[in-house]
Image (cartoon, helix red, strand yellow):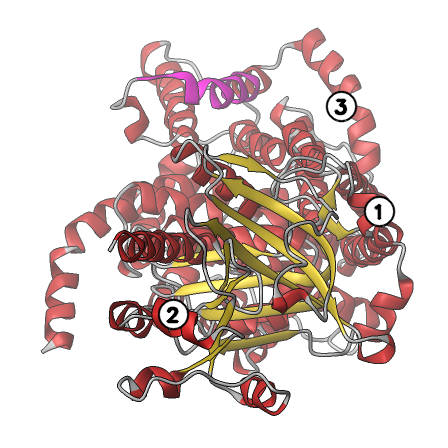
């Protein structure tokens, strides 16, 4: 029944997916042509990749609303491949590159089979941003000249960047018609978002400039009766016999080291671009579904193989076209199929119109794309996370520009690791723990919460271990991730944790992080690198608030309570309780209290044992005073520890008339008579019907402790509710 219902629902969504596929095709057409031309491949190579991607991935893919086709990130790689493999002959280089694309497709498919989709987690987020920015600079550097109608500017990315002023001066001096079209197209692309008319935005910006350029051509032909003043070299060419003259890949260099290097480069970039795009698009999915990444890699590999044999470029998941799909109502993979179908119709029936598109206009679209990838705003945003992140970004960007993409990302990874060592100032921490499991997860019986503890350090090097545990938790549940035993947390992890928080929130679950309160950060940004500091260094330190601290501050503000995140190493008031009798109190932090100070909540760091048995622990406590005298007692859960208490002389006070309570709890104190008087049947029933808390009385004040760890905000709310109910019950008893 569910399958039929699902199929029925799918049928109902076909019209909106047809519409979304059509809108996406309007973007895919100019971008596909432009990306192919930018790679020095035939214009239709990009369209073939989009069609192969749409047809194959829509059937075999594991994503729901993604769009597949040629990617921005591969332009520089494919350009270098065609140029180098052909040794000056671009067409021969293109045929060799087709073979490399097919090999790359096989590798992507194998990655999916081997479930290596998680390998993207080994790349630091900032280094990836630097690599993508370098790709953007490369696209912009080459296409800027073509946009102005100037061909023949050779050299690498740096040489082409240096030549931009000369090309611009030449353009100003000559004013070629094609260059004016390109330049005005670029201006329009930048201004498009500022046009507020919603009907205008029904047509994507790239399609507007393409349609306008074709319309100008018809104006010259039909109105002015003149040829369009654009040289033939700057117009798109489509073969007459489109389906009979498909290029054949040349596999003769498959054993060549340069060829294998091209295969590795293409595979690396295709893998990274696809995985990042899939992750990003999952956040946009209105149904909040999570893609099967490995299934998608297999489908992308198959699509690249098909595309390569037909003369097309690599197939990757593309974020821009995928976001357009979501924004226009795409709900399932059929939108990807329809976008491919419309592209076939465009090429078959509108081939003559496509050949009227000036290359300068397509180049303007790519210049704008390159700028978006390498925008200075990206560097500013990264700098706000931390100056060290900006340095990683710049180093990766510069290395990629001056060497190669693979070397750039390798240097970015190494430099990120070195930066982590410098920030943590603890080479020993990384060296001895890098291969050790650092994540423990279990389901807490009483609360039903998933508790995840992270130890030592958590960075891009071992984030996959934490992700593997978090991915096992249903997003409708309550997860608590504890970093209190973790000395270092990097930017990649903080950003990943933020993604999980959003995902759980969308699905109705709750995802909380604890234990980052004593970690220092260079900036206020929530994704900033965090490292633990010694207690003496934390005293008086104004460190940025962690996410949990911000939640506690908001919690206090809502209730008109006071909150202080400051660290206090004064044990006053706690040393009178039995719990702390054999423990050393290190400090208190995160104190919350109501105006009359009858309730106080705080975190405590304390130590047990000595020398090699010494262990540092953290937990959340609540104190409240009563207007009447209480007997001194300790109420704990019956377990091995309380059995040892009995052997040590702490007798368990039982209530024969309440056997369940006596079996569940260990109650001890010197004044048995007073304790029995306090523990009325009503109070006993109260404890039996509520979640367990460790409770102590020193005669004037009650100490309440939850779990043997820091409590999440939700758990603090439960603890406070429990304490208020207990307070009211004790007051009612004292009034009798």
Where does the C terminus fall, quadrant-wise? Answer: bottom left
Residue at 38% x, 48% y is 284
**Is residue 651 shown left or right of residue 569?**
left
For the residues bearing labels 1 and 2, Cβ distance under 8 angstroms:
no
Of label 1 and label 3, which has the lower sequence position? 3
Residue range corresponding to the magenta coloring:
182-196
| Separation (CA) of disc 1 from disc 2 | 40 Å
- Dot label at residue 164: 3
| Separation (CA) of disc 1 from disc 3 | 55 Å
Residue at 75% x, 79% y is 436
Q: Which residue is mark 1?
A: 536
- Dot label at residue 369: none
Q: Which residue is mark 2?
A: 474
Q: Nearer the viewer, mark 1 or mark 3?
A: 1
**Is residue 339 shown left or right of residue 496?**
left
Residue 702: percent from left, percent from top: 49, 57
Of label 2 and label 3, which has the lower sequence position? 3
């Amino acid at each position: 029944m569910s399958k039929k219902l699902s199929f029925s629902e799918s049928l109902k969504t076909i019209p909106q997916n047809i519409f979304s596929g059509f809108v996406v095709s309007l973007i895919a057409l100019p971008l596909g042509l432009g990306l192919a031309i930018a790679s020095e491949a035939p214009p239709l190579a990009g369209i073939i990749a989009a069609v192969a991607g749409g047809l194959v991935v829509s059937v075999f893919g594991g994503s729901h609303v993604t769009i597949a086709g040629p990617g921005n990130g591969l332009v520089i790689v494919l350009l270098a491949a065609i140029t180098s493999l052909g040794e000056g002959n671009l067409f021969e280089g293109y045929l060799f590159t087709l073979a490399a694309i097919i090999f790359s497709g096989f590798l992507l498919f194998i990655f999916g089979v081997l479930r290596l989709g998680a390998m993207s987690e080994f790349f630091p987020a900032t280094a990836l941003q630097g690599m993508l920015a370098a790709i953007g600079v490369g696209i912009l550097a080459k296409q800027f000249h073509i946009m102005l109608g100037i061909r023949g500017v050779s050299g690498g990315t740096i040489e082409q960047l240096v030549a931009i002023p000369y090309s611009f001066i030449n353009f100003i001096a000559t004013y070629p018609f094609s260059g004016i079209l390109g330049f005005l197209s670029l201006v329009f692309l930048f201004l498009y978002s500022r046009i507020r008319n919603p009907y205008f935005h029904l047509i994507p910006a790239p399609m507007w400039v393409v349609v306008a350029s074709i319309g100008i051509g018809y104006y010259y032909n039909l109105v002015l009766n003149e040829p369009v003043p654009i040289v033939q070299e700057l117009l798109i060419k489509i073969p007459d016999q489109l389906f009979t003259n498909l290029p054949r890949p040349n596999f003769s260099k498959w054993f060549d080291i340069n060829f294998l290097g091209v295969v590795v480069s293409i595979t690396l970039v295709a893998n990274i671009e696809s995985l990042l795009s899939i992750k990003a698009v999952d956040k946009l999915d209105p149904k909040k579904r999570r893609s099967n990444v490995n299934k998608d890699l297999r489908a992308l590999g198959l699509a690249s193989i098909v595309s390569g044999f037909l003369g097309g470029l690599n197939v990757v998941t593309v974020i821009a076209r995928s976001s357009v799909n979501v924004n226009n109502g795409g709900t399932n993979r059929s939108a990807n199929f329809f976008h491919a179908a419309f592209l076939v119709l465009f090429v078959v029936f509108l081939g003559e119109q496509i050949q009227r598109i000036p290359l300068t206009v397509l180049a303007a679209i790519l210049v704008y794309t390159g700028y978006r990838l390498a925008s200075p705003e990206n560097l500013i945003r990264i700098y706000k996370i931390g100056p060290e992140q900006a340095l990683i970004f710049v180093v990766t960007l510069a290395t990629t520009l001056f060497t190669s993409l693979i070397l750039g990302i390798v240097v970015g990874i190494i430099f990120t690791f070195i930066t982590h060592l410098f920030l943590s100032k603890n080479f020993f921490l990384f060296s001895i723990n890098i291969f050790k499991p650092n994540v423990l997860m279990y389901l807490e019986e009483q609360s039903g919460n998933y508790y995840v503890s992270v130890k030592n350090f958590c960075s891009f090097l071992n984030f996959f271990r934490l992700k593997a545990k978090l991915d096992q938790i249903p997003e409708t549940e309550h997860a608590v991730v504890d970093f209190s035993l973790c000395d270092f947390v990097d930017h990649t992890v903080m950003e990943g944790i933020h993604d999980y928080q959003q995902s759980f929130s969308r699905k109705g679950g709750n995802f909380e992080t604890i234990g980052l309160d004593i970690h220092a950060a260079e900036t206020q940004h929530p994704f900033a690198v965090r490292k633990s500091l010694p207690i003496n260094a934390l005293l008086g330190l104004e460190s940025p608030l962690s996410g949990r601290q911000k939640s506690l501050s908001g919690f206090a503000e809502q209730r008109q309570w006071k909150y202080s995140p400051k660290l206090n190493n004064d044990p006053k008031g706690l040393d009178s309780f039995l719990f702390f009798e054999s423990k050393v109190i290190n400090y208190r932090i995160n104190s919350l209290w109501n105006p009359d100070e009858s309730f106080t909540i705080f975190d405590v760091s304390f130590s047990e044992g000595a020398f090699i048995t010494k262990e540092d622990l953290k937990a959340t406590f609540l104190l409240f005073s009563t207007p009447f005298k209480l007997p001194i007692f300790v109420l704990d859960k019956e377990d091995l520890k309380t059995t040892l208490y009995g052997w040590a002389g702490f007798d368990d006070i039982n209530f024969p008339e309440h056997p369940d309570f006596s079996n569940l709890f260990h109650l001890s104190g010197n004044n048995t008579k007073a304790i029995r008087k306090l523990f009325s049947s009503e109070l006993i029933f109260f404890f039996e019907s509520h979640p367990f808390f460790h409770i102590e009385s020193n005669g004037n004040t009650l100490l309440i402790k939850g779990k043997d760890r820091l409590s999440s905000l939700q758990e603090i709310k439960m603890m406070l509710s429990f304490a208020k109910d207990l307070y009211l019950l004790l007051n009612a008893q004292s009034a009798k």
